[in-house]
Amino acid sequence: MSVINQMLKELDERKATQGAIAVTPYQAPKAWYQNSGLWVGLALGLGGGGLAFGWLALSKLESPQFIETASMSNKVPVAVIEQAEVRPSSAIDQTASADSKGETAKASTGETDANPVVSQAQVEQAKPKAEAPQIIEENGIAATSVEAEPVTAEPAKPEPSHSSKPQVSKPDSAKPEPSFELVEVVLTKKDKIARAITSAEQWQQQGQFKKAAVDYRTALKLDGSLHQVRKQLAALLFGQNDIKGALSVLQQGRTQYPQEIDFGVLQARILQQSDRMQDAMALLQSLQLIAVPEHAKGLILLSEISQAEQEFVLAESSYRSLSELQPNVAKWWLGLGFALDSQGEQGEALLAYRRALSTSGLSENGRQFLTNRIAQLGG
């Protein structure tokens, strides 16, 4: 029973709840013209259409055709070419003649036209020449490309002549063809010598001694009096261990110029370097050296070689000449005293030693030797 009572109780509660719900009264639908959304959409559509129409009108005003029409109404020629019909010349002449007749009739009657009509031919003549419009075909539709800027008319080109021979334009002045002329330059003897010496020095600096010797010989063939060139050639050959060649070059100089003692002295120096002392002394003696400045080199070499070879007589002679030629040089007096002392002439040797000691320019060893030897000789 409790279950049934519970179900009855729940049924009663549901009925009470449904009775408490408010029921919305019925409303009739509105008419179409009373819909506010419809009027808003219509207003927006009209506004968009107006904007589209205004844009089309503005683009029409800016088009070349509209510009041409406006310029023609103001009687100002504009260099814009319209797409016109192509008519034969006879039709244009008829139109022009008709226009001229009409103007004549108006002039005879005294009538004037406030807005005179300009013929098509006159309009075409008033227009400046312009380039032909370009036809652009896009998607099968032909369009005319027209420039709005005026174009300056080009002068008329002369018609080609119908003569049988074509006319060939000749240049105003023919350009001279380049010409080449070989000019022989004759070098003087002096120029040849200078070139040979310069070349020899360059070859020598580069270590090309054989080529340098050839150029030196060339210069000597041109002028044998080039004593310095001969000495350079002899030194070059001696440096290349060509002893025979060096001596030969110097001997040629001695033969041609006997007064040049330096050639003989150089020969003696080469012999000395080759350990040919006797040949060197013999050669120097043959030069007959005396106490003059020109023979100073020969005397010095002879004194050195003779003293080294213990040829004291020859050494005494050469040192006497040198002490007379250069009395302020201490080593000449020392050499003379040693040569005399070696021959047993102590008196004269003591005098030479004292003279050397009183002269400046001695080394410390030389001064010590002189002091001891003078004391030994009782001086």
Image (cartoon, helix red, strand yellow):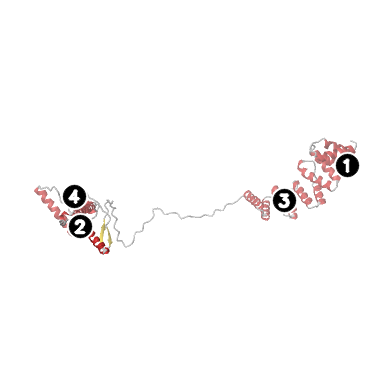
Q: Secondary structure at mark 2?
A: helix
Q: Residues within 10 Å of mark 2 (few under 14, many from 20)?
A: few
Question: Circles 4 and 2: CB distance less than 8 Å?
Answer: no
Question: Circles 3 and 1: CB distance less than 8 Å?
Answer: no
Separation of marks 4 and 3 at Cα, in angstroms: 111 Å
Mark 4 or mark 2, earlier in chain: 2
Q: Residues within 10 Å of mark 4 (few under 14, many from 20)?
A: few
Separation of marks 4 and 2 at Cα, in angstroms: 87 Å
> Which residue, as the protein is rendered here, is positioned at the far front?
1
Q: Which residue is mark 1?
A: 341
Quarter holding the N terminus is bottom left
Q: Secondary structure at mark 1?
A: helix
Quarter holding the C terminus is top right
Q: Position of residue 34 (x, y in %)?
A: 16, 54
Mark 4 or mark 3, earlier in chain: 4
Separation of marks 1 and 2 at Cα, in angstroms: 174 Å
Q: Which mark is residue 235?
A: 3
Mark 1 or mark 4, earlier in chain: 4
* Tag 4: amino acid: Ser
Q: Position of residue 304 (x, y in %)?
A: 81, 46
Pick whichever, 369 or 17, lies toward us: 17
Q: Position of residue 81 (x, y in %)?
A: 24, 55
* Tag 1: amino acid: Asp
Q: Which mark is residue 73?
A: 4
Q: Measured along the vertical axis of the image, is residue 350 above or below residue 112? A: above
Q: Which residue is mark 2?
A: 19
